[in-house]
Image (cartoon, rainbow, N blue to C red):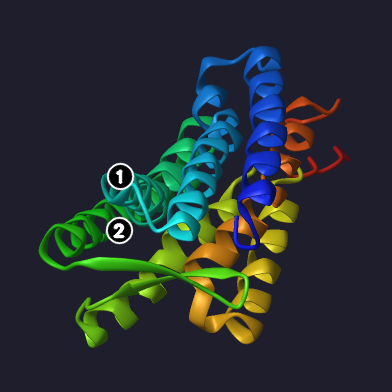
Amino acid sequence: MCFSAEASFAGGIILSAIGTATLTKVKKPQQKLFAGIPVLFAAQQFAEGVLWMTLKSGEYEQLQNITTYIFLITALVIWPIMVPLSVWFMEESTGRKKILAGLIITGGILSLFYASCLISYDVSPQIQNFHIQYIDKFPVIPVNIALVLYLVSTITPLFISSVKRMWLFGLLITISYTISSIFFAQYLTSVWCFFAALISIVIYWVLISPGTRTRQVPARSQP
């Protein structure tokens, strides 16, 4: 996470517990991928916790590189396709599934773009003002466009979904991005992942709480 190694490890432990509980309790196979999101966030936070330690020590350069890329591959390559895909699996509405399929394609293209950037350009993590800043030399204009597509592919599916309470998860993620971009723009990748990781605890409530089904349009009463 974005404040310290201890915060990262604590968050990773909590998310692991929540994610494991969610995966254990969900009954439908199509819910498994979405239920696994907190577990992936946990792995991401454990990686950044180790990164904090290597940056502070100034040693273990190879481990520093490994954890940097674990964090960034998860943030930039996996999330854009995993979020719409996991929502698509749970969706029962044919019309909504078609829209989500388009977002999966968008996320897939975006994942390829970020993967090519991570391969082609160096990334240097640095600790600044109690945050980790990932300094890169990615091309500016394509990255600005990619950011818009990133938000579309990772947030929009949560509002398109007909699963009850999913919109609340989407709203919290949107608020967390807004706060991160306004107050922590320089550390957006790390800070937003921190907020999003904590918010992913809501996934347990979305999937496990009684009455969690798809939203239904009220039927017209018969004359």
Give whichever of 45, 166 is nearer the camera. 45
Q: Is residue 209 left or right of residue 27?
A: right
Give whichever of 138, 169 is nearer the camera. 138
* Quadrant housing residue 194: bottom right
Give whichever of 4, 77 is nearer the camera. 4
Give whichever of 85, 100 is nearer the camera. 85
Q: Which residue is mark 2?
A: 106
Q: Residues within 10 Å of mark 2 (few under 14, many from 20)?
A: some
Which amino acid type is marked by label 2?
A: Thr
Residue 152 vs 202, above or below: the answer is: below
Which amino acid type is marked by label 1?
A: Ile
**Mark number displayed over residue 66:** 1
Q: Is residue 158 left or right of residue 122?
A: right
Q: Residue at x 42, y 49 (%)?
A: 79
Front of the two marks 1 and 2: 1
Please tell me whether mark 1 sits on a helix, a strand or a loop.
Answer: helix
Q: Is residue 78 left or right of residue 198?
A: left
Residue 85 rendering spot, x and y as whole percentages: 41, 40
Q: Is residue 62 visible in this depiction of the protein?
A: yes
Q: Residue at x 39, y 58 (%)?
A: 58
* Quadrant housing residue 159: bottom right
**For marks 1 and 2 on the same chain, the one whose residue lies earlier in the sequence:** 1
Please tell me whether mark 2 sits on a helix, a strand or a loop.
Answer: helix
Residue 42 vs 25, above or below: the answer is: below
Residue 120 rendering spot, x and y as whole percentages: 11, 64
**Mark number displayed over residue 111:** none
Residue 49 rendering spot, x and y as whole percentages: 54, 47
Q: Residue at x 70, y 25 (%)?
A: 17
Q: Residue at x 68, y 43 (%)?
A: 11
Q: Is residue 91 visible in this depiction of the protein?
A: no
